[in-house]
Image: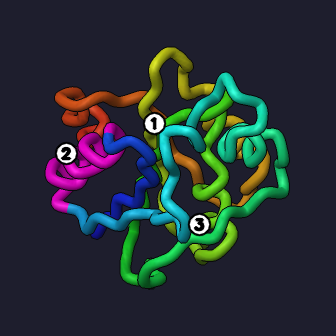
Amino acid sequence: MKAAVVYFSASGKTRHVAAELASHLEADLFEIVPEEAYTDADLDWRNKKSRSSLEMTDASSRPAITGPRADFSGYDTVCIGFPIWWGVAPRPVDTFLDSVDLAGKDVFVFATSGGSGISYASEDIRKRYPFLRLKGAELLSAGNCGHFAKEIMG
């Protein structure tokens, strides 16, 4: 199995979890990088006019992402990680999913969260991206990636 771990991390928490999962899977690691980095003010979920609040209340929002576009044709499995925002994946993850071809790949999603579960976020992805072969979803934190890696490896 050749695997890739792709992640979006605004604060760094998801980055650490993604790196740990990639290590367990011996997978290549890719970051979804927003063209404009998020500031603390942008991430203030209590402010209805903050950048993240405006993006998350607009389902069509697709913030620009930057960096090299990876070719996933050589991968069997792609794991996609993100922090949960407003119960779902942040809009930069949508930008990524809209821009890549993951047909025929086993896709697993993982998330970090301060309080939300992952079931709503994974169902939202399944509903909005029905072409994905979504095989599993897990809420992870640093230090608990091993069991999910075993699930992914079968």
Residue at image mark 3: 96
Secondary structure of the residue carrying numbered label 3 = helix
Q: How is the image coloured?
A: rainbow
Q: Which badge, 2 or 3, is on the more N-terminal residue?
A: 2
Q: Which residues are magenta?
A: 13-26
**Residue at the location (57% across, 49% down)?**
134
Q: From the image, which quarter does the N terminus lie in?
A: bottom left
Q: Which mark is residue 111?
A: 1
Residue type highlighted by circle 2: Glu
* Contact (Cβ within 8 Å) of mark 1 with mark 2: no
Residue at image mark 2: 20
The image position of residue 52, as x and y in percent, is 66, 43
CA gap, disc 1 to disc 2? 13 Å
106 falls in the magenta region = no
Q: From the image, which quarter does the C terminus lie in?
A: top left
| Mark 1, other Cα within 10 Å: few <14 / some 14–19 / many ≥20 | many
**Residue at the location (73% across, 56% down)?**
129
Query: Which quadrant of the figure has residue 42?
Result: top right
Using the rendered image of the protein, determine whether residue 60 is visible from the camera's viewpoint.
yes
